[in-house]
Image (cartoon, rainbow, N blue to C red):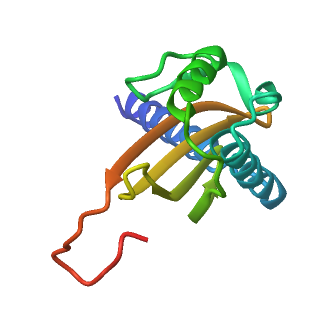
Amino acid sequence: MRKTIAIFILLVFSLFSMGLNAQSKKVSQSDLDHNKKLVIDFYQKIFGDHDFTNIDHYLLPTYIQHNPNVADGSAAFEKAVKGWLQNKPKTKIDVQHIAAEDDLVFIHIKNVLPDGKLQSVIDIFRIENKKIAEHWDVHEIVPEKSANAHPMF
């Protein structure tokens, strides 16, 4: 019985150690910097410049989209964004914050809507093989009044 318990404990410890080891694989600082630059360049090129000529440089064809209004795939993304940007002027993207950890890049954008209202946008991108593989986003209109003195940007 003791031998069985000892083997069980060793097995659990080994599996736990393997899990920690897998989670502790860190991305180099140069890769983190590359990933942030990739996302900033992508955001400016697509949403600011309305330039889709090199979209495959940024997105994997199997791009996974978590925004419920857009289908998966780089072609579906391009179609949706072209519709959103139709009749909107080109602009300089106003990046408020950007951070990267492991294969994720987090970006916070200050966006001015056509009606002049401010919008806070947070996007999360997963990078794979130096391209954007997956995306999540949250959009919020900046309220005129706040319950605190802290701005959203």
- Which sits in the foreground, 128 or 111? 111
Q: Is residue 78 above or below residue 120?
A: above
- Which sits in the foreground, 75 or 91? 91
Q: Is residue 91 above or below residue 13?
A: below
Picture coordinates of residue 9, whole percent (x, y): 43, 38
Q: Residue at x 63, y 50 (%)?
A: 24
Which part of the image, by quadrant, shows the C terminus? bottom left
Q: Which residue is situated farthest in the left direction here?
A: 147
Q: Is residue 20 above or below residue 64?
A: below
Picture coordinates of residue 135, whole percent (x, y): 54, 34
- Residue 38 in the figure: left or right of residue 83: right
Q: Residue at x 31, y 80 (%)?
A: 150
Q: How many marks?
A: 0
Picture coordinates of residue 74, whole percent (x, y): 65, 20
Classify residue 33 by image quadrant.
bottom right
Q: Residue at x 55, y 53 (%)?
A: 106
- Which sits in the foreground, 69 or 17? 69
Q: Is residue 128 above or below residue 148?
A: above
Q: Residue at x 61, y 16 (%)?
A: 73
Q: Which residue is situated farthest in the front direction here?
A: 87
- Residue 34 in the figure: left or right of residue 63: right
Classify residue 12 by image quadrant.
top left
Picture coordinates of residue 148, whole percent (x, y): 21, 80
Classify residue 143 by image quadrant.
bottom left
Which part of the image, by quadrant, shows the N terminus? top left
